[in-house]
Amino acid sequence: NAGVTQTPKFRVLKTGQSMTLLCAQDMNHEYMYWYRQDPGMGLRLIHYSVGEGTTAKGEVPDGYNVSRLKKQNFLLGLESAAPSQTSVYFCASSYTVNTEAFFGQGTRLTVV
Amino acid sequence: AQTVTQSQPEMSVQEAETVTLSCTYDTSESDYYLFWYKQPPSRQMILVIRQEAYKQQNATENRFSVNFQKAAKSFSLKISDSQLGDAAMYFCAYRNRNNNAGNMLTFGGGTRLMVKP
């Protein structure tokens, strides 16, 4: 029962470097989401996808890009990392718009 | 836009006692869901309980229950017979029922619950 798996779990980047976070789900879910978690602010939606080949902006999309080339994978990219992107990133997925969202275990990213 | 507010950054409770975590929200919608998520030190987000706004009956899940006051836009979580394993961050979250933009959750800032032995 893998559920939602995020890779990597920890990463340290230097300012200006790029990286991609991978989210994989094995539940055949249509919807996938990327959130960031910052102290005192809960989780905020970065981008989301309502199906393979589709993506849309969430609440805090600036500085991030996403792709959903395969239904089971949702990639989050940082083209030029900034210290303000230091955060814990969560991926989630759900089968339909009205069903429970399942979360991955998070990726702690530090940009120095 | 919807907002969710948790006014208690930290709470503590004695083991076996009862504690209530507060949550208020603001929305112009009439049909929506409310959730409480638990986040232990492992970082995993675990759904604790869910309430559908059109249901008047408060949801319960074993030792967890909610007090849903729709008119007041209040959604508190009561944990009875608190256990050491209940220590975690708790997040209140909101979602429109028919959200064409996907299953987007709006979260509160969280309440850290400490359980004293």
Image (cartoon, rainbow, N blue to C red):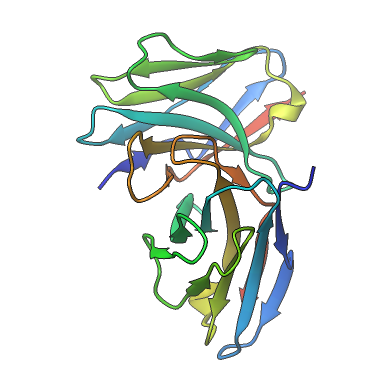
Is residue B6 in view from this perspective?
A: no
On screen, residue B99 versus residue A39, left or right, reads left
Q: Residue at x 40, y 48 (%)?
A: B102
Q: Residue furthest bottom?
A: A16
Nearer-the-camera pick, B18 or B63: B63
Q: Residue furthest top?
A: B57
Q: Residue at x 61, y 65 (%)?
A: A70
Q: Nearer the viewer, residue B55 or B62?
A: B55
The location of residue B84, given as percent across then percent down, is: 76, 26
> Which residue is at 32% across, 46% downward?
B100
Residue B2: quarter of image: top left
Q: Answer with left or right where residue B22 lies relative to residue A89.
A: left
Residue A84 appears in the rendering: yes
- B71 displayed left or right of A15: left
x then y, percent, for residue B75:
39, 24
Question: Residue B32's quadrant in the figure?
Answer: top left
The quadrant in which the C terminus of chain B is found is top right
Percent x, y of residue A58: 38, 60
Count the marks: how many?
A: 0
Coordinates of residue A103 in the picture (x, y in percent): 62, 47
Which residue is at the front of the view, A64 or B87? A64
